[in-house]
Amino acid sequence: MSVFDGLKFRKVSSPIHNLDPRIKFIYVIAIFISAILFHQILPLAILLLIQLPFVFLARVQKQWIRSLRGAAFLATFIFIINILTKFFYNNWTLTALDIETAIGMTMRFIVLVESFSVFFLTTSPDYLGLALEQSRMPYEFSFAFTTAVRFVPVLAEEAQTIMDAQKARGLELEKGNILKRIRNYIPILIPLIVSAIRRSLELAEAMESRAWGAAKKRTNLYLLKLHKGDCILISVTALILLVTIYVRLFLFSSIPLMNELISRLI
Amino acid sequence: MSIIEISDLVYTYPGASKPSIDGLSLNIEKGDFVLITGPSGCGKTSLCRTFNGLIPHFYSGELKGQIIVAGQNISGKKTFDLAKHVGLVFQNPENQLFALSVEKDVAFGLENLGMSRDEMRKRVDWALNLAGIYDLRERSPHEVSGGQQQRVAIASVLAMQPEIIVLDEPTSFLDPLSAERIFEVIYKLNQEQGITVVLVEHRLDLTVKYANHLVVMDKGKICFEGNPRDLLCNEEISRIGVGIPKATLLYKKLKAAGFDINKQIPLSSDEIADQLLKVLRP
């Protein structure tokens, strides 16, 4: 079950959770673009620090750190690959500058991961579905999305039941080599898929019975409205974008490198 | 006035060799509380599916005979048109709730109908209150109990303000106490809102006291039909596999032993207790 725990969203109320998901998404995209525009450590470090107030306001530090820890493996991988290519490319030599570029690349990746994780940690799937619906997406898409999210815990529970039932009949899941272990899961998957199909038929029946497809234009119980917080976030996003573009266009070459800063200090 | 009129219905599922409903005629009056019972596989569920046109529109297959629901012949109507008149509640509460909050689920049908937000709000609150789940409106359907889920399903059907509510074994996933609460909600709707109720149920013990029209089905046909008190006197009914209420059984046994405690056949333990008390403490 623990695998699916991460997908369960707990309803929390915080200034960040209550923000309009569309605005939050624009903000994430802005951070994304900014991160791609720079490779130096200094601006990337600033972008990284900008996220912190969000994390603390939303009180999702624990989950956030967990998601960063999940990204740590990939980040290390990116760092090593960068170092190695530089190393081989420059005939088996490595300069301090190379290490700085490698760190910059890794940080860029971390900025991308953490901004997206802040978005997903603070946006309820319900809200996300609503945002999809109200940004003129066909309703079928957002319905498919929210229904999928809704049925994750249900299917997880069912998988557990089937696993228990098959184990009770003598199925040994943790036996043999990797290929054998994968094959062990077939008696779990087949009943799970069959029951999911049956479930989907019942769902379709229930949808039909509740006037699915009656009106051409569907209405919605909730309406997403922009509040004060959303306006602040829009301004913050605009500011970040403006500063990014300005720095990139006019000050790009004068961004100090860590190497220079350190050598100047020494 | 009949609200559901079925005449000479024969229905075969696609690919099935013999019909699931085999020559069935039924009249249901407006305001009735109809209880349909019978052994598994007797066609109860298929019959329920015809009320809002799931059969034949969703399931296809072969349908003969005529079904008129709320003055409309279902063969010419789409299921979503009939959904305004007939609300269907299914067996498994989990598979009829789609949204991530109770409130949104109750609003689902109304959203489909394209209702305005203010009207929708009013109807949703009304339905939530009637089903007694107003406090749960912001919870997620999968975190509430099975009984509460089934009440959400009832509320979501109620919000569309249908004239008829059809419940297909709504309590088979529930414990007896939650089941009883569901039946009380349904009975209240029938009595106070005048909604016609069609309930499919095995547990006559819990339900027959609410019904004024009992239908016993077997092999795609109706075997017995009428007032529950008259029907339960019939000896043949227990041979089909209908669970006769314990109170009625006790009454019959006493009668067979020569103690006819009352003219009226009891349907619930309360009734038989009253009758026995009258005899024991005259």
Image (tube, coloured by chain):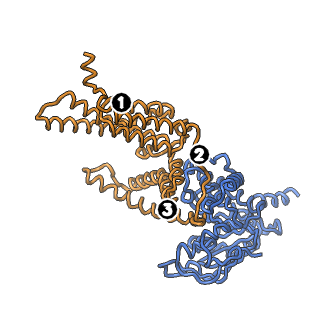
The chain displayed blue equals B
Q: Chain of mark 2?
A: A
Q: Colour of chain A?
A: orange
Could you say where residue B43 lies in the image, as x and y percent from the top left?
59, 74
Q: In this view of the protein, which residue sits in the foreground, B37 or A70? A: A70
Which disc is residue A225 wearing? 2
Residue B131 visible in image: no
Which-is-in-front pick, marks 2 and 3?
Answer: 2
| Residue type, mark 2 in image | Lys
Q: Check disc 1 and report its element: helix, strand or loop.
A: helix
Could you say where residue A179 lies in the image, as x and y percent from the top left?
26, 53
Could you say where residue A184 lies in the image, as x and y percent from the top left?
32, 55
Q: Which residue is pictured at 22% across the width and 29% down the height? A: A97
Q: Which residue is pictured at 66% across the width and 66% down the height? A: B84
Could you say where residue A172 lies in the image, as x and y percent from the top left?
33, 52
Quarter-wise, where is residue A62 in the image?
top left
Q: Earlier in the sequence, mark 2 or mark 1?
A: 1
Q: Residues within 10 Å of mark 3 (few under 14, many from 20)?
A: some
Residue tagged 3: A199
